Image: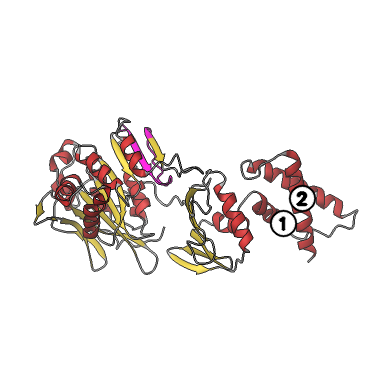
Amino acid sequence: MATVTATEHIHDEVRELIRRRGLDPVVDRRAARQLIDEVVSHYEERVATSSLPPLLDRDGVTRYVYDTLAGYGPLQRFLDDPEVEEIWINQPGKVFVARDGRHELTTTVLTPGEVRDLVERMLKPSGRRLDLSSPFVDALLPDGSRLHAVIPDITREHLSLNIRKFVVAANGLEDLVARETITPHAARFLEAAVVSGLNIIVAGGTQAGKTTMLNTLVNSIPPSERVITCEEVFELRPNLPDVVAMQTRQPNLEGHGEIQLRRLVKEALRMRPSRIIVGEVRQEESLDLLIALNSGLPGMCSVHANSAREAVIKLCTLPLLAGENVTDNFVVPTVASSIDLVVQLGLEPGGGRRVREIVALPGRVESGVVETADIFTTRDGKLVRAQGFPPHDDRFARHGYDLPALLLGRGSDLGADNNADDPAGYGASGRHSY
C-alpha cells in the first residue's frame, strides 16, 4: 500500500510539472523521462526527512509513471515486448495479445474511460478521429504499429481496438530463408523474378505474413529503380534509395479531403515510377493497378485469399466494383496478361508462417478461366519444385539469369548453403513464426 501511495504522489507531482512547463510527454519522451527521473530522485531525498511513504520499487514506479503519462498506460508493456505481435481489446475487461501466431487473454483489466483515453492518445499524432460520423479508424502509431478501432453502435456495446505491431521480422528474402518461411530454392527464384520485373501478387489470410513477404520482395528491387508505394496506412519499409511512400486520408469533420487508395494509384503513375507497390487491394483500386501493370509498369501488391487460385479469381472480380461499364470480358484477359506470379502464404496451426505455393500465370484464358501453372507447391509439408514455368523467360535472360538452371535449383546462394545433399535448395519445411 505504501508503494502505491508513493506512486500516486510521484505521478501527481510529475503531472503538475508537465502542465506548468507546457511539456507534451508523448511528443517529447526524452524530456518526460528526464523529468520523471528528477522527481523520483528528489522524492527519495525527501523521504528520509519527511513523513512521505518510502519508495520501495524505484524502477517499477518510474516505469508506471512513464507509461501512464508518456506511453500508453497498461498496454505499453505489451508494445515494448518484442514477442508480442498484436494486441486487441474486445471490452475493457478482456485484453488479448498474440505471440508466435497464438493469442492469449491477459490479466490486464481497463475501465471504459481508460480505453477511450488510450485511443484518443494513440490517434493524436496521426490527426485521425473516431466519432459517430467516423466510427472506424485506421492509424499509425509513432513506432510504426497499425491501429484499428471501432465504436458502438457499430460494435454491440464496447469500443473494439486492434494494434498490429510493426515488428522488423525480415528485411530481405534471406531473412525469410533463415526463418524457414521459404526455401532457398524458391527464394532465389523470387529474387530473380523481382529483378527481372515480373508482376507479383502476395496472397494469404489474416496474419499469414503477406506484408512481411511483400516488404522483402520490394527490398529485392534493384536500387537504381524508382519505387512508389500506395497504402491505406504506412506499413511497408522499403530499404531503397529512391522511394516515395503515400497513404490514404480520411475526410475531415465537414466530410471533405478524403484521399482513397484508388486516387493514390492514379497519382503514382504521374511520378515517374519504375515500380508501383500497393500494400493491399480490396476494392476498385484493383482496376487501376491492373491498368498500370498492363501498360508495362512492373508492380506488386497483396490480397486476402486462401489459395493462389482464389487470389486470381478475386483479382478478376474486384475490378468489377469500379462501375457497370467494367466487365469480365475486359478484366479476365487483363489479369491473365498483367499478373505473372502469385505467392501464397499460410498460417500454420502452431503459429508459423510459410510459403505454400508459387503459381505462374502464362497469359492464357480458356472458357473465361485464367490458366495457371504451379512453379512451387507443397508436398508432404515441404515446398518443392513443380512442373510449371513462369512467363517472360526473355526478361530473366535480359537480367543475366539462366531460367532453366534457376528452376533446377542452381544459382547464387541466398542465405543458405547449396550443398550436394540439397542440390535443389529445397531446405527445411518452411515453418516459422515471426
Q: Is residue 232 magenta?
A: yes
Q: Residue at x 53, y 45 (%)?
A: 142
* Residue 224, position as x, y percentages in the image: 31, 31
Instruction: Give the residue type that dot 2 points to.
Output: Val
Instruction: Give the residue type that dot 1 points to.
Output: Val
* Residue 109, position as x, y percentages in the image: 61, 66
| Highlighted range, magenta | 223-243
* Residue 316, position as x, y percentages in the image: 21, 53
Q: CA distance from mark 1 to mark 2?
A: 9 Å
Dominant secondary structure (helix, strand or loop) of the stretch shown in magenta: loop
Res. 65 visible in picture:
yes
Instruction: Tell me, yes or no, whether the two marked residues, 1 and 2, touch with CB atoms within 8 Å.
Output: yes
**Residue corresponding to mark 1:** 61
Tell me the element at label 2: helix
Q: Is residue 229 magenta?
A: yes
The answer to whether 31 appears left or right of 133 in the picture is right
Picture quarter containing residue 354? bottom left
Residue 40 - label = 2
Counting residues from the start of the chain, the first of labels 1 and 2 encountered is 2
Q: Give above or below for 142 relative to 57.
A: above
Residue 206 - label = none
Q: Give above or below for 49 relative to 352.
A: above
Q: Give above or below for 238 relative to 55.
A: above
* Residue 209, position as x, y percentages in the image: 36, 56
